Image: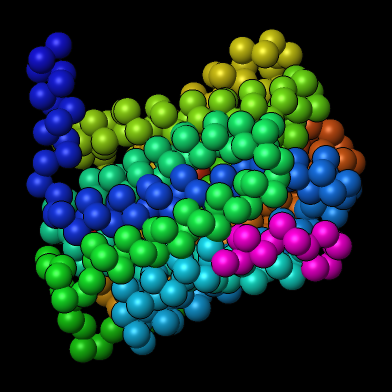
Amino acid sequence: MRSVYNSYINSFKGLSKEVWWLSLITLINRAGTMVIPFLSLYLTQDLGFTLENVGIIMSCFGLGSLIGSWLGGKLTDLFGAYQVMLVSLILTGILFITLQYLVSFWSICGGIFVLMIIADAFRPATFVALSAYSKPENKTRSVTLIRLAINLGFSAGPALGGLIIGTLGYSGLFWVDGLTCMAAGILLLVLLNPKKVKVLDSVENKMPLSAYKDVPYLVFIISMVLFGFVFVQYFSTIPIYYNDEHALNETQIGLLLAMNGFIIFVFEMPLIKFLETRSLSKISNMIIGLMLVTLSLLILNFTTWIGVLVIGMLLMTLGEMVAFPFSNAFAMDRAKRGRQGEYMALYSIAFSISHIFAHNSGMISIARLGYQTTWYLATFVGLIGILLLLLLKKVLLRNSRK
């Protein structure tokens, strides 16, 4: 038992204090974004929108995320990661509080769109900061620590969010979201002042390559779009599926989603530490992760037993634990070839594109074709993503031999 404990503790050693501070800020920020998992339920049950309406609103969510990721990358290259993160956190907090007062369809579309532009400018800036604060050999584990912070927040957030909805309603949820985002901004100001931090991996590239001309990287980005298409169903169609097909309420859905975050918090760092000692490449690990996430939706068609929801969540969680850290580390390694903000923005944009199309098409699909067909279609999309990663692996292996 002691050896297991020591192994777990050792998996966290060697990371810089700046990475730990950034993780703390991310934890507080993520714990506050508890509106997101309940957004589709809020729009349908509290405001009475149709599934088609919700699909359009979620497309605005994705479009704002896309523009925000692109803009965040540009601003990071111009002004630096710290400035972009600070402004994003403070303004996002204000916008979360404001969002509760929007009730018409078009005002919500516009509000979600603007909110996501500001909120997701934070993402590429965070990746660039993380890369600078990490030694090259620690980047995958540094990414994993940030993900642990995200998922610990995600574990507490939905459970707390369900309780807040049950006692204070959705209005209380928006207030908590806004205030925690601003609190994260204040901590960033105190803990990660540029005058106090130490850069461990400074990249100087006199002739930076454009991410948009890096063909292997673009193949990787397309595969991440397809991966995101499958993964984001857990933030829109899956909560509605839990409610419609298995009669789960908000609190039960929150607890099921919280299980995902708790498992990741406990097991992801040791898992990544173990996988880094294996002979598998980053791309091979991504393939395994995408296979597991895809399977998590496919098995929902095999039985009506409520336990399949737990099995599906476990498969999705394991797939996420493997795919995200290695895909993020792959992107950061590749970013050294060019403008880091642009490379990391494109990585974020991949998932923004998924948000634009996956939510809307998922909602339309379940409204017109039903849940079973929707899960089969998602499986098909996941398989295409796996094939693209296999192609990328082959191309990079061939290039390395030249």
Outermost residue toward the front in this view: 168
Residue 96 in picture, x, y percent from top left: 61, 60
Kindly identify the residue that appears in the image at 53 percent across and 63 percent down.
Answer: 93
* Prevalent SS, magenta region: helix
Q: Is residue 269 left or right of residue 186?
A: left
Residue 165, by quadrant, is top right
Q: Is residue 61 visible?
A: yes
Residue 33 in picture, x, y percent from top left: 54, 50
Kindly identify the residue that appears in the image at 28 percent across and 45 percent down.
Answer: 145
Between 265 and 388, which is closer to the camera in this rendering? 265
Kindly identify the residue that appears in the image at 32 percent across and 64 percent down.
Answer: 188
Q: Is residue 229 left or right of residue 139?
A: right
What's the magenta region?
94-107
Residue 130, by quadrant, is bottom left
Q: Is residue 271 magenta?
A: no
Q: Is residue 97 magenta?
A: yes
Kindly identify the residue that appears in the image at 89 percent across and 41 percent down.
Answer: 368
State which quarter of the image contains the C terminus: bottom left
